[in-house]
Image: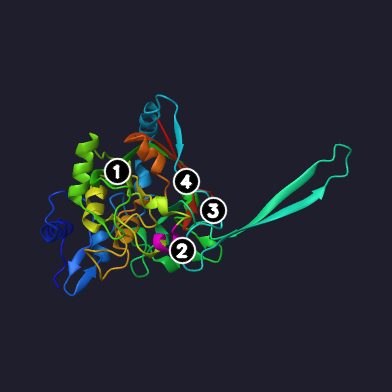
Amino acid sequence: MKAMSRRGLFGALGCLCGAAHLGLTATPVQAQGGWSPPASAQRCPSRWGAADRRGSMNLMTPERAKRAASLIRTGTVIELGQTLSQEMPFFGTRRFDVHLKQTFMNPQANRRGSNEEMVLTEIGQVGTQLDMFPHQTIGDETYNCVKVPSIMSRGGFTEMGVDTVGTIFTRGILLDIAALKGVPVLGDDYEITVADLEQAQARQNIRIEEGDAVIFHTGWGTLWGRENARYVRSCPGIGVAAAEYVIARNPILMGADNWPVECAPSKTMPEASLPVHQIALVINGVHLLENMKLDQLAQQRQSEFALMVQPLKVKGGSGSTVAPSALF
């Protein structure tokens, strides 16, 4: 097949998806016989150059932090992180075990006792979590076509570890798709479309802007700790076209109250495994914020807020459990 330019690639996908909302980002293509990501030459270098390792965090500027701070008017804080516990839903061999250590009673007269705990877990990929770019690949390449074997070490990734992300403090917007559809929880395999995103923005009188953290409320988070088997079996979320629509507007991250942000398994790309993970993390360098607790924020009908996220400084980590907050 003749190599296609980025501009040609965007046009092809626009025809395929029937969408008129594509931006200047490399996009997956529907190859003959199945879905396929774009070739390395079509997605690299990134918009910030071949040496870039920060991706969308290049948009985290002092001006955006100041704008986010201006959204805090009443001082309300809503926590958006799920509680870490052994009752969480897990995938594969992921685990979270807490062992209490009643250590000792100090010998001094004031009888100071001391208690600690030992936590055994995959700290980057349990609970509410932020994905870093090397968490996902296209073949053996991660963001900006960096060869994963070249940045792997026994102690973690030598480049693009989650410790390099830093504080995220930006405007967050909540697109309440469950409310748009008039249901508490979207269907188990509902795929959010571009039309849904447009309608939600119109209904809530808000627009996605560059540097935003774009959060999707599906209602799926209400299953957390109650229907774990159902929670991990599938989930509603954004489809490929919806992801491309958002990414074309240059967000810092996309998040949701489900485990992959995207619809799983994909309905429009059933032959592909979590394609939005590749589109966001690998192709465009946009972080994903998963397993959020959004019920209280949705009940308040708060569409715009300051979002605070601070990943743990896990050197070389593929991600981090986080406890984000919405402030307004």
Callout count: 4
Residue for badge 3: 314
List x then y, in percent, for residue 73.
39, 24
In front: mark 3 or mark 2? Answer: 3
Q: Looking at the rendering, in which quadrant would you find the C terminus?
A: top left
- Cα–Cα gap, marks 1 and 3: 32 Å
Residue for badge 2: 151
Identify the magenta region: 227-231
In front: mark 4 or mark 3? Answer: 4
How dense is the environment of label 3, judged by Cα within 10 Å: few (below 14), some, or many (20 and up)? some
List x then y, in percent, for residue 184.
32, 47
Amino acid under disc 4: Gly
Q: Dot 3 lies on which element?
A: loop
Residue for badge 4: 81
Decide whether residue 229 is among the magenta residues: yes
Nearer to us in this view, 293 or 37: 293
The answer to whether the residue labelled 1 contacts the one labelled 2, judged by CB atoms less than 8 Å apart, is no
Judge left or right: residue 120 versus residue 293.
right
- Cα–Cα gap, marks 4 and 3: 18 Å
Q: Which residue lies furthest to the bottom in this view?
A: 33
